Image (cartoon, rainbow, N blue to C red):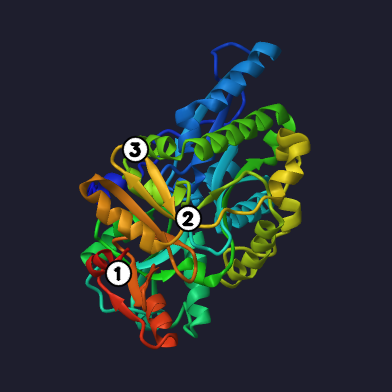
Amino acid sequence: MNRTRLTIAALATVLTAGLATGCGGDAGAGDPRAVTVTVGYQSKTINTVTAGTLLRELGYFEQELAARGSRDGTTYKVRWQDYATGAPITAQMTAGKIDIGSMGDFPLLINAARGRQLDRPTRLVSVTGYNLRGGLNTIVTAPDSSLRTLHDLRGKKVSTSVGSAADGTLVRALQRAGIDPEKDVRKLNQQPSVGASALQSGSADALSQFVAWPGLLAFQGRAKALYDGAELDLPTFHGVTVREGFAKERPAVLEAFLRAQKRATDHLHAEPVAAAESVARATGLPAEVVYLYNGAHGIATFDPTLRTALVDALKKDVPVLRSAGLVGDVDVDAFVDDRYVRRVYGAAYGKAVATGAPAARAELWRKDGTTRSFRTPAELLAAVRAAGPAVRAAYVPDTTTGTPWFADKAVWVADGTRLLPFVTASGAAAYTAAHPGARTVPYARALRGAS
């Protein structure tokens, strides 16, 4: 498989040096009808691409605004600002310097709380990518680490971004394992790139992060999965938030953004390989990693609609953030505003919001650009063996959680004639303990045994 190597330093997001003003009229000097819309996004957080990186590359928002401008005589300009996490986007939104932003579920709640606290309220208006079990977040360790379960993290240093969705996964996972996340581990509050470097240098024993960092580090051979966030079986997602004042002042512009987001989502579904390649070029991430999350059978499901399951998950997140002192009470129902995305979908909204997430399948990506999905992991392995050097990447869903992972990074179990993949060693161990005769096998042996 292709082993594209990127340095950790090359992946660190450089914050925009000059902070721009929000929507308000600097698109054309001296033109009172000129409007600039400032969008905050996270290029490396690749399940936000339909409201960020991919949307920017496709130019759909600019197209929607140009069409509107031809009707209302206004000159529109879009200013994109790239950040590593959601926190600085919230800071700029509450300062009136970003109009529309995308971030994860935990940062969205902080966004809501800060907006209310400062009397500059924000609203959640759409979703980008989600995973109903929580598979977008993963805890990883160094490849040669002896740590195999969450219990092994007692007394260890774990890097995460406090207040992020990945931090929420860490806290919940430790609590379920009977480990106090504040007393029993030493939590390091670090940006994702800093945490990745800390893991590599040995100054952190584990890293809990959101997409695409766990998959990237695993792909590069710099980490292995310790805990699959889908074991929590709690939805996690990223969404689009807007300044309430902006939404009220320029509802048509917000709807133009959501129409553009829907178009970008449709493009990703229709052309998943092309979309992954586009995001890879824009971010410097390996396309194989982008596809792990955003592919036809990737970890993330892309859908702008505001589903009840996701809103309910937000409500369950509030106590976690409150216990950490990051928010007080958050009125989730008041924060969620689906009026605009409903108008974009029209009569089709009800059907869209009722459509279920597709089932995960094993998938092969060949170097000629073609892809093929398979009913079983064994069929995928046989195809990998037959294709040989023509393979670009191969993905398999975890036997228990359904989380897709790189086939050559998965932990494989042979159970009679069946070959079963797992994201983590602990997941494989739990299976073999419950199935006498089942045993873990190296990937090379699994390949040879596939038929």
Q: Amino acid at mark 2?
A: Ile
Q: Which residue is mark 2?
A: 299
84, above or below 201, in the image: above
The answer to whether residue 316 is left or right of residue 433 is: right
Distance from disc 2 to disc 3, alpha carbons, whole Å, reads: 20 Å
The answer to whether residue 240 is left or right of residue 334 is: left
Q: Which residue is mark 3?
A: 369
Front disc: 2 or 3: 3
Distance from disc 2 to disc 1, alpha carbons, whole Å, reads: 26 Å
Q: Amino acid at mark 3?
A: Gly
Q: SS of the residue at dot 1?
A: loop
126, above or below 255, in the image: below
In the picture, the disc for residue 204 is 1
Camera sees residue 185: no
Instruction: Tell me if label 3 and label 1 are in contact, CB under 8 Å.
Output: no
The answer to whether residue 399 is left or right of residue 249 is: left
Residue at 76 percent of width and 52 percent of height: 334
Camera sees residue 113: yes
In the picture, the disc for residue 69 is none
